[in-house]
Image (cartoon, grey):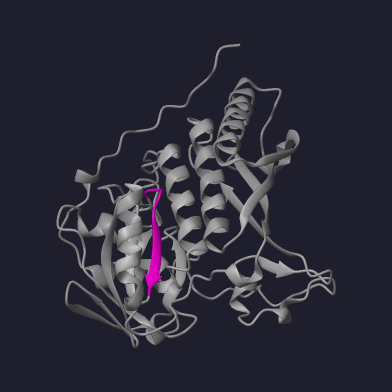
Amino acid sequence: MEEIKEEVREFTIDQIPEEQDIYDIVVNLMVNPNLAPVNYFNEFSEESVELSSFDNDEAAGNGVFCLNSGMCMAMTTHAFHHHLESDPQKATEILISRAARKMIACGATPEAVNAFLYHIDIADPNGQFIASGAKRGLENACNKFGIRITDRKIRFDYFSAHGPVLPTIIISMVGSIADKDAIMTHSFKTKGNNIFMIGRSYNDINSSEYLEFYHQIEDSALPEFNIDDEVKIQKVLKELINRKLIESASPVGKGGLFFSLLRAGLPTGFGFDITTDAEIRKDAFLFGESMGRMIVGVDPSKDDDFVDFMRSTKVPFFTLGHVTKGEIRIDDESLGYIDKMTPAN
């Protein structure tokens, strides 16, 4: 069977002007439903899950829960539709990497995953191309991260009356938590803590909320991604948590670095003061969604130990800035205070 691969219209970052109003971008992206900080469907629970056993209920927001038996677990569900029709293997590897990175960041070990392909006609050559590519991506990523695939199947759903719906892959991942005291949360803990980035930044805004929502450009390649780098970074993060060298960990996800920092500050009302990389475009640095990046908060008293350990790993890292009482500052310019960073304000 000949594989059918959809051509993606080439986009380059040079099509977007480099000098832009960062505050205007932030204000406009705040109303993007994919980035809005308010989740209206987060108040539910099951009798078999005991969340009150945690000192910080924020753990529940990270998908961490404790059963009545005392066993602690983590679960996360992710979906992806970008370029399943053109590069299903890479798209699936990105999805698994995102889920595993989120799980590692909360102190859990990814154990098993299952996958579901939505709106795929397996009788059609295009559907077969997507399914075979997704299968390769699932197997490769799970092999890299040491994750089991439940029942070794990808399940399908197709109904022609759905109309023009983008092919989508949905995965659910479950993880184990050996030590409840090692649970990590994404929120900033203390004013004055230093903020570090683990991973490398790129001049990349492909398939980002910034590019698609703010600039209304939907056709671009997948974001920068290297699965071997992902494996190294996640191993390093796990060791940082084990050594108690960090107080918070947050994957850079939707909305890029800025919105990941915002999500880390909102639960506690802390802000951040950061300096961008002069070698990277400011919009790409703040809003690009390239893979393989983590934000960690470090107590100043542990800075030396943190830096020494990171240097020994050979994994790229750099200082972003520090946690503030509530103000958000980028390159010495104030964007206001975090309690005003909601669509209502």
Residue 92 versus residue 268 in the image, above or below: above
Q: Report the quarter where the N terminus lies.
A: top right
**Residue ID at (72%, 77%):** 51
Boundaries of the magenta span: 290-298
**Residue ID at (70%, 26%):** 122
> Relative to the observer, which residue lies in front, 330 or 212?
330
> Relative to the observer, which residue lies in front, 122 or 59?
59
Residue 267 part of the magenta segment: no
> Relative to the observer, which residue lies in front, 299 or 83?
299
**Residue ID at (58%, 57%):** 103
**Residue ID at (57%, 62%):** 107
Q: Report the quarter where the C terminus lies.
A: bottom left
Q: Position of residue 56 (x, y in %)?
A: 60, 81
Residue 273 versus residue 114 in the image, above or below: below
| Left or right of residue 292, residue 95 in this image | right
Residue 254, quarter of the rendered image = bottom left
Q: Position of residue 251 (x, y in %)?
A: 45, 59
Residue 159, quarter of the rendered image = top right
Q: Position of residue 83 (x, y in %)?
A: 48, 37
Residue 181 versus residue 269 in the image, above or below: above
